[in-house]
Image (spheres, coloured by chain):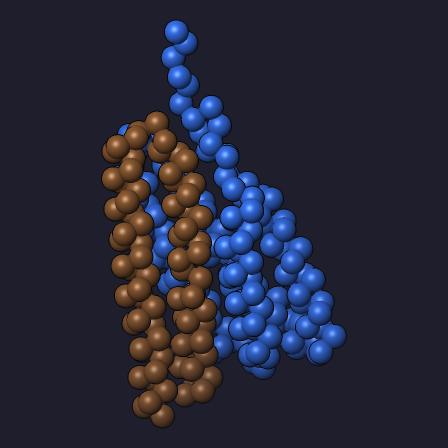
Chain colours: A brown, B blue
Amino acid sequence: MEMVYIAAAIIIGMGALATGIGFGILGGKLLEATARQPEMANQLQVKTFIMAGLLDAVPMIGVGIAMYLIFVVAG
Amino acid sequence: MKPRQSRITKVPLARWLIIEFTGLSVFSLLWLLHSPLAGYSAFVGGLIFIVPNAWFVHRVYRYQGARNAHLMVGNLFRAESTKIALTAVFFAAVFTLMEPVHVPALLFTFAVMVLAGGALRWLIRPKPRR
């Protein structure tokens, strides 16, 4: 039973780590690009928003599976 | 020379929501052929995606323009972390409060909605207006 909790923790932890790194790079590049070309700020925001949607797809599914493991399999 | 007007990005949130709810209804009806419980679970799975995501879109486009770049990025981070937290809370609530639940229908519909949502934002993009 403990293994299920460990598995859920690994799923959520790795997902959070990867999303954090991804969003850090994404946000940093947005700031950098906006500072270089302020007139492009809104277009860059649109591109960042689209990439954010793609970036968090896998961790979101991971959160769902982790909750299933915690509350249904182990619960 | 005419000064350049500030651009305001038009976010097609209503269009996204209409398309997402239409797709979710179709998916739920398909699962309904399997069993009423599966249809209901699929609808709930889709809602778990749609509600936090609509909130995310609303928060991300709160600030616009180069002057507000730092607020834009800060809001992006806050909105994303809140979205993931909301998703986890909704899943926990469904798995503890909803009894019984058809788990494959719930998770499969959620996964399809997540992937379709990404594709939808790619296909129907927010348009910066001059």
Residue B88 appears in view:
no
**Front-lying residue, B85 or B23:** B23
Res. B65 image quadrant: top left
Residue drawn at x 47%, y 23% is: B130
Q: Residue furthest top?
A: B1
Closer to us: A18 or B10 = A18
Figure disc tally: 0
Relative to B25, is B126 on the left or the right?
A: left
Picture quadrant where residue B12 is located: top right
Q: Is B32 above or below relative to B5?
A: below
Above or below residue A8? Residue A61 is above
Q: Nearer the viewer, residue B58 or A50?
A: A50
Residue B88 at x, y percent in the picture? 41, 68
Measured from the top left, where is residue B112 in percent x and y? 56, 65
- The residue depicted at 56 percent of the width and 58 percent of the height is B116
Residue shown at the point (50%, 35%) measured from the top left: B127
Up/down of A72 relative to B62, above or below: below
Extreme residue toward the right, this view: B33
Left or right, B110 with reference to B18 = left
In which quadrant will I find the N terminus of chain B? top left
Across and down, in percent, residue B104 comes to 57, 78
Residue A13 x %, y %:
29, 72
Q: Is residue A35 visible?
A: yes
Q: Quadrant of residue A32?
A: top left
